[in-house]
Amino acid sequence: MTQTGETLEKREIDSVREKPNRIVIVGGGFGGLACASKLGGAPVDVTLIDKRNHNLFQPLLYQIATAILSPADISEPLRRTLGKERNVDVVMAEVVGIDAKRKAVLTRDGAPVEYDTLVIATGSVDNYLGHDEWRQHAPGLKTNRDARRVRETLLLAFERAELTLDPDERHKLLTFVIVGGGPTGVELAGAIAELGAFLLRRDFRNITPEELNIILLEAAPGILSGFDKKLSRYALKRLEARGVDVRVNTPVEAITAGEVTAGGEKIPTGCVIWGAGVKATPVAEWLDVEPQRGGRVPVATDLGAIGFEDIYILGDAASVQGEDGPFPALAQVAKQQGQYLGRKLRGEAEGRHDVAPFRFRNRGITAVIGRNAAVFQSGRFKLTGRLAWWLWAIIHVYLLVNFEKRLLVSVQWIWTFLTGQRNARLIDDKT
Amino acid sequence: MTQTGETLEKREIDSVREKPNRIVIVGGGFGGLACASKLGGAPVDVTLIDKRNHNLFQPLLYQIATAILSPADISEPLRRTLGKERNVDVVMAEVVGIDAKRKAVLTRDGAPVEYDTLVIATGSVDNYLGHDEWRQHAPGLKTNRDARRVRETLLLAFERAELTLDPDERHKLLTFVIVGGGPTGVELAGAIAELGAFLLRRDFRNITPEELNIILLEAAPGILSGFDKKLSRYALKRLEARGVDVRVNTPVEAITAGEVTAGGEKIPTGCVIWGAGVKATPVAEWLDVEPQRGGRVPVATDLGAIGFEDIYILGDAASVQGEDGPFPALAQVAKQQGQYLGRKLRGEAEGRHDVAPFRFRNRGITAVIGRNAAVFQSGRFKLTGRLAWWLWAIIHVYLLVNFEKRLLVSVQWIWTFLTGQRNARLIDDKT
């Protein structure tokens, strides 16, 4: 090797080293994890901060709630995914703010974490439409803890209904109210109908499937509003065939302990579940900027936060300024944005500057109503029924992180499909 | 069919119907569930009462605690096992007493449950040796909730040790104390050593396997006191080879938040787990009789509670009066006693009277120290090492209730064996 070659190489390395090289990613969801993975092995130091120790496959949380899967089946420890990337640190801490002047992320219990470049991928939280007091009576479905809580509430309602001698109390306990007719609400309603029909037919003595009363409340004129009208009507018909009482044009007016008021009617209930939409995590507040619709923070087409040099935002917390407008709050959007940002930041660290704006490649949207019944839509391609259901199952198994999880989830789905049995019918004791 | 035949058949049925026919079983563990299963289809009404909705395979709880399995993998809903037996009712309720005069079981929230024959199979609880105040700092390992709590404490200790800059704090967080050198303590210590070695080598940056400090405290002169001396010495050597600090002749003197005192030494610690033995549930109190050693209630050789006509007690809560003396607190004892009682009560209901005393058929005892290392003993037959480990694994998979669980647990064990990875490394978020 010649002297010139060595010098050139050295100079290139120096020019790389001079770059800002501490990248901090807040949030280990689909977006943050994809970004961190893309930066594995790049000439930067990466720190991924999350208050949980695992990435959660949220689209299947409703299956935890309805006793088909266990939390570990859809949760992947962040250290497991990133453990081999020696330039990526994982920090388990709760972020409470950002000091953009000092370029530091503030955490609840630990020291501030300084960054040169910050990626915010904190996603969204349940949106109680200004009624945060409803939260205690109507859990959402965002974490394993939420899903386990819903599962215990559902199963306990069946146990108590079996024991009570009071017909009003029994009717109340067997009335399940789901708020919101989006994919979460539809999937939950369908899964609860199947769970109830199986359990009450086989395992209980004093209550029958006919007494089950599942009510799906939707403020808009139709369910699955993000889908084609035809698919929405199909979903409605299938839900009704399974005994779900779907009430459209019916906004919720009040939720108290044991009672929901909607469309002027008071509904006594043993279980309310909130699936009526989300809002962004308080990133706008952390950055002291004016939030847009749903609490989202405006970003440029390269996901750079507008008004900040070195902060990027992706996923549910970001609102893109430009031709495409805000993207839907979907896992695939966050994941693609994370991959885009990871590639972009890696390129910059390696001396390449790729300024192509982020483009979303829609992989299609899907919702499952029950066994052999689902809807799938990608552009003008639409599918319903058994084929859509199988497509949904295959896609979701494929998306699970590793081989073992794919195998475990497949076994449990096949078992539930064949027998109706649910593996995860657990109520913990309180002591 | 002749007139005589019809009359005879009718008379037989009447003679059966006149018998006491309401059998109430309290406790859905190995004993109670085996008894209920044997009574399925018999001419009696059976009610199984448990405060949980599932039977728990307690011998594998330490694998929940060390992130190999999920609660649902080793828990079988009682209604699932018994759902098809139309003469068996399952009641989810907490029993708080027995009114032997009124022949009724008292529950916390519900109505008393009346019986003609009562089977008590409530097992045992952790025995804190008169120091119940230790419980809050040193959870035992009796329920899924306990095991999940231990798992979260262990995993959080690693996370906090990774973040702290204080070497004393780090040393404290990485010191795990296990109280009791019986099978539970030995299995936990071995499994924590393997978990720690794998995680700290691969997934953490600031802490190393050498900093791990696992202390097993045993008051007696040796561990695994129920086993042959040779096996006990083998277990000790294997644990020490895995880095466990085994301290025999070292009784615990005090447990406070973050500190254990034993053998005169104060040990700062991030996690204490209690595995130092059990005592019977308060059955003696319920029946107002004088308990024997470990809180057990004296029963005759047919498991009938002494002094009561119609109450039987089995498993950890019973102490047999007779040639065999009390049986060890083992799942196999409870299960065999449950089967024996089920057969006996079924026989009586069908007009047969089998008064043979219960006989225990020892299937051998086993404890696993880690991968490829276990001990197995059955009478004079002894086995250690790889073969004992495989025998242990095969027996435990075989004992799991249904095909699906066997398959799921096998997949996870094979995966962990091959890769060292643990599927269930979950810390729930608190919100």
Image (spheres, coloured by chain):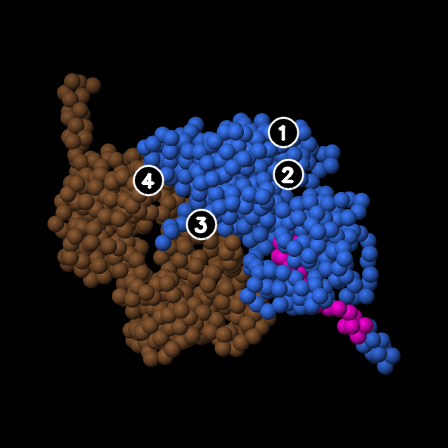
Chain colours: A brown, B blue
As drawn, the label of residue A90 is 4
SS at mark 3 in the image:
helix
Chain ID for label 1?
B
Question: Looking at the picture, how far across and down is residue B131, in whole percent?
Answer: 55, 43
Count all numbered tags in the image, as a single digit: 4
Q: Which residues are magenta?
A: B13-33
Cα–Cα gap, marks 1 and 4: 43 Å
Residue in view at x 52 percent, y 29 percent: B264
User: Mark 3: which amino acid?
Assistant: Ala
SS at mark 2 in the image:
strand
Sequence-wise, the earlier of marks 4 and 3 is 3
Left or right: B68, with B49 as reference point:
left
**Residue B24 colored magenta?**
yes
Residue in view at x 25 percent, y 57 percent: A280
Cα–Cα gap, marks 3 and 1: 40 Å
Name the residue that disc number 3 marks: A72
Mark 3 and 1 residues: CB-CB less than 8 Å, in contact?
no
Residue in view at x 69 percent, y 50 percent: B291
Left or right: A1, with A86 as reference point:
left
> Mark 1, residues whose alpha carbon is within 10 Å: few (<14), some, or many (≥20)?
few
SS at mark 4 in the image:
strand
Question: Looking at the picture, how far across and down is residue A56, in whole percent?
Answer: 37, 51
> Mark 2, residues whose alpha carbon is within 10 Å: few (<14), some, or many (≥20)?
many
Cα–Cα gap, marks 4 and 2: 39 Å
Same chain for the residues at labels 4 and 2, yes or no?
A: no
Mark 2 and 1 residues: CB-CB less than 8 Å, in contact?
no
Cα–Cα gap, marks 3 and 2: 28 Å
Cα–Cα gap, marks 4 and 3: 19 Å
As drawn, the label of residue B366 is 2
Name the residue that disc number 1 marks: B221
Which quadrant is the N terminus of chain B positioned in? bottom right
Chain ID for label 3?
A
